[in-house]
Amino acid sequence: MPITLKDLKETHQRIKPYIHNTPVLSSSLINEIAGAQLYFKCENFQKMGAFKMRGALNAVLQLSDEQKKRGVATHSSGNFAQALALSAKLQGIKAYIVMPENAPEVKKKAVKGYGGEIIECEANLEARETSLNKVVSETGATFLHPYNDYQVIQGQGTATMELIEEHDDLDYIIAPVGGGGLLSGTALAAYHFSPKTKVIAGEPFGADDVWQSLEKGELIPQTNPQTMADGLLTSLGDKTFPLIQELVEKIIRVEEDEIVTAMRLIWERMKLIVEPSSAVALAAILKEKEKFQGKKIGIILSGGNVDLGNLPF
Amino acid sequence: MPITLKDLKETHQRIKPYIHNTPVLSSSLINEIAGAQLYFKCENFQKMGAFKMRGALNAVLQLSDEQKKRGVATHSSGNFAQALALSAKLQGIKAYIVMPENAPEVKKKAVKGYGGEIIECEANLEARETSLNKVVSETGATFLHPYNDYQVIQGQGTATMELIEEHDDLDYIIAPVGGGGLLSGTALAAYHFSPKTKVIAGEPFGADDVWQSLEKGELIPQTNPQTMADGLLTSLGDKTFPLIQELVEKIIRVEEDEIVTAMRLIWERMKLIVEPSSAVALAAILKEKEKFQGKKIGIILSGGNVDLGNLPF
């Protein structure tokens, strides 16, 4: 494994002082509906509202003093942008965030709120990369990839380490999958700390590049994804794909209406605000109910950053 | 005091096996905004989604076997209806709930979901009381008042007991006030377990009978209340009023837009679903910020039963 048990332990020690050990919650009503015992790891309560804080912070904390002086840079319009901006702020360093000019105002505002400097670019991959390269060469900032980075993956794995500390007898852990940072971190943590626990991912049908990649045995990039789960639009990377291939039992694909149903259950029954991406994991369990009958299952609720003015119900 | 420290301890022991010891959460961002340290007791995570479960259950658990055979009855279109239905269900007894015929379908459905039998009546106080008396005389069910009842008040006080167990150095505890069951229970628990902690309530301007009653020194009934905080529409009772008069430092009144602002902060920043009534307590703190500068404050988030199709933002 490219990431050892010791790596994960050290990562957790490193980021622990700055992150929340988020609570694990249950709902007897949802357990009844699922016919299983579900333990929700509430990363929606994490600093800046998502698990991404763990990976971003781990990467930032490992920069040299020289690197810190020059700051960090990334391209993201999602939670990683905010996570990197906040991690940089906590360390008193600069964060340059390349965002497409059509990114929602609410997301730009959040990044600025955490002190990040936004560099706008046209909304296409080429413009993104050009802008990022320009920033990096002008400032000397260190580029941090939102998920295809071992430091980031290790950080994301710490959520599962904490979950296993509380519940060491899980049959399954389910996470949503987009670029695969959370999923590969989750799978690595289970592999090292609870080898009998199987890891499964939920993925929207409209963005099923991971399912396709595992079917074909090669990395299929995401093209024209269509899903409300806006955290799951990205392609796998060359670091996340092999880990998922090796460590993840299967991908369960879900329809958009199944995501809404699961999201509504979590909102109404657990009184938790989670983003659509987070609901994909519960939707996967409800999709293959028979498989999970009577099992103990950990679920990573990945985040809670949702636009209250634009809910799917 | 009509309720002793021993009464409260026994109440907590009695209901503990059936309720959640709900988590106490904080938000560094909201602390920054308030200039104080706030500890939110999350009764929105309580069974059936509100603190009302504590009082209803305590009252039901103290019925004689003979009374249990004949069931319980109340009139309520809010959280107490659901709490009593669920408490009765847990004890395997019948619950008759008198509800106005214009009560929202979602509330009727919730009561039925917990196994309660609904008796519909016209939407006025007289019809309510007539229907209730009829049910009680026909069935022999024991009437339980939603808040003007010492068993119910004691039950509500247990939320504050748990809060004080976790944080024994609070300067203030703030709760919303409607009929006064939660507030008088809160004040009693603080009086017995943390006498130096002052208790304050938040109340909507559009339903400020408690503020008026304290000003005049006599119980002024609520007339034509206008507020989105639908848990705070009721009048004080002859048991809750004297307790509040004696034990509560002051009532802070808040405007509707201040309730929305506070509710939005809790939703967006804490990722918690709370009902408007719950947000009234935070709104009160933000209203009188100077008073609370640098203080440690417990807040009772009373519940999370809100219609997702009808949000104020």
Image (cartoon, coloured by chain):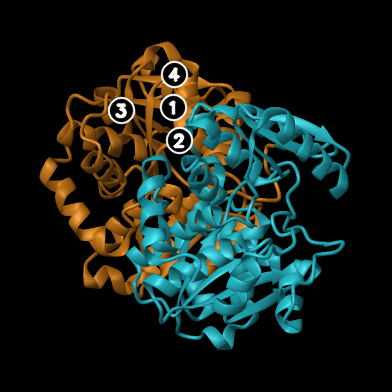
Chain colours: A orange, B cyan
Of tags 3 and 2, the one toward the viewer is 2
Q: Label 4 marks which chain's residue? A: A
- What is the CA distance from the residue labelled 2 to the residue labelled 4? 33 Å
**Percent position of residue A115, x then y:** 48, 71
Of tags 1 and 3, the one toward the viewer is 1
- What is the CA distance from the residue labelled 3 to the residue labelled 2? 29 Å
Q: Label 1 marks which chain's residue? A: A
Residue toward you, A158 or B300: B300
Of tags 4 and 3, the one toward the viewer is 3
Q: Mark 3 and mark 1 in contact (Cβ < 8 Å)?
A: no
**Percent position of residue B226, x then y:** 83, 62
Q: Seen in the image, is B249 located left or right of residue B7?
A: right
The residue identified by callout 3 is A244
The residue identified by callout 4 is A212
Res. A220 image quadrant: top left
Q: Mark 2 and mark 1 in contact (Cβ < 8 Å)?
A: yes
**Percent position of residue A45, x then y:** 44, 53
- What is the CA distance from the residue labelled 1 to the residue labelled 2? 6 Å
Q: Amino acid at mark 4?
A: Gln
- N-term mark: 2 or 4: 2
The residue identified by callout 2 is A27
Q: Tag 2's secondary structure?
A: loop
Q: Are marks 4 and 1 on the same chain?
A: yes
Residue A31, label in figure = 1
- N-term mark: 4 or 1: 1
Note whether B213 is above or below B23 in the view shown.
Answer: below
Q: Are marks 4 and 3 on the same chain?
A: yes
Q: Tag 3's secondary structure?
A: helix
User: How many residues crowd mark 3 within 10 Å: few (<14), some (14–19), many (20+)?
Assistant: many
Q: Amino acid at mark 2?
A: Ser
- N-term mark: 3 or 2: 2
Q: Are marks 3 and 2 on the same chain?
A: yes
